[in-house]
């Protein structure tokens, strides 16, 4: 292995790590959106039941 191979391998590892972090952030954002939607739906349900 020469220096160029080592550098290319490090660059590929960095790309894979960045892609994994991006996927993780997207998954967390999606979970947060689902949680907020559920909280909002529950809030609307509570408000409707109070008015009746």
Image (cartoon, grey):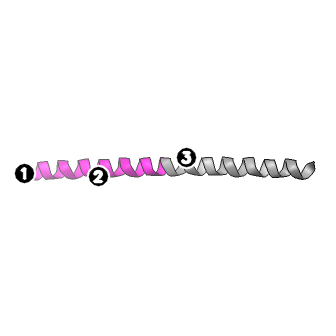
Give the spatial CA distance, label 3 vs label 1: 42 Å
Q: Which mark is residue 30?
A: 3
Looking at the image, residue 13 sits to the left or right of residue 49; the answer is left
Question: Of tags 2 and 3, which is closer to the observer?
Answer: 3
Point out the tag, 3 or 1, that comes first from the N-terminus.
Answer: 1
Labels in figure, total: 3
Secondary structure mostly taken by the magenta-highlighted segment of the chain? helix
Residue identifier under label 2: 14
Q: Mark 1 = which residue?
A: 2
Q: How far apart are marks 1 and 2 (CA)?
A: 19 Å
Residue depicted at 43% across the width and 47% down the height: 23
Residue at the location (67% across, 47% down)? 37
Let me know if residue 19 is in the magenta part: yes
Residue 16 in picture, x, y percent from top left = 31, 48
Residue 3 drawn at (x, y percent): 10, 53
In the displayed structure, does residue 7 sit left or right of residue 50?
left
Residues marked 3 and 1 touching at CB (< 8 Å) = no
- Horizontal relation, residue 26 to residue 47: left or right: left
Residue 1's spot in the image, x, y percent? 6, 51
User: How crowded is the residue under tag 1: few (<14 C-alpha within 10 Å), some, or many (20+)?
Assistant: few
Crowd rating for badge 3 (residues with CA inside 10 Å; few <14, some 14–19, many 20+): few
Q: Give the range drawn in magenta.
A: 1-26
Q: Is residue 3 left or right of residue 33?
A: left
Pointers 2 and 3 in contact (C-beta within 8 Å): no
């Amino acid at each position: 292995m020469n220096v160029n191979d080592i550098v290319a391998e490090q660059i590929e590892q960095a790309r894979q790590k960045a892609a994994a972090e991006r996927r993780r952030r997207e998954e967390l954002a999606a979970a947060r959106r689902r949680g907020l939607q559920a909280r909002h739906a529950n809030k609307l349900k509570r408000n409707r039941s109070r008015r009746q």
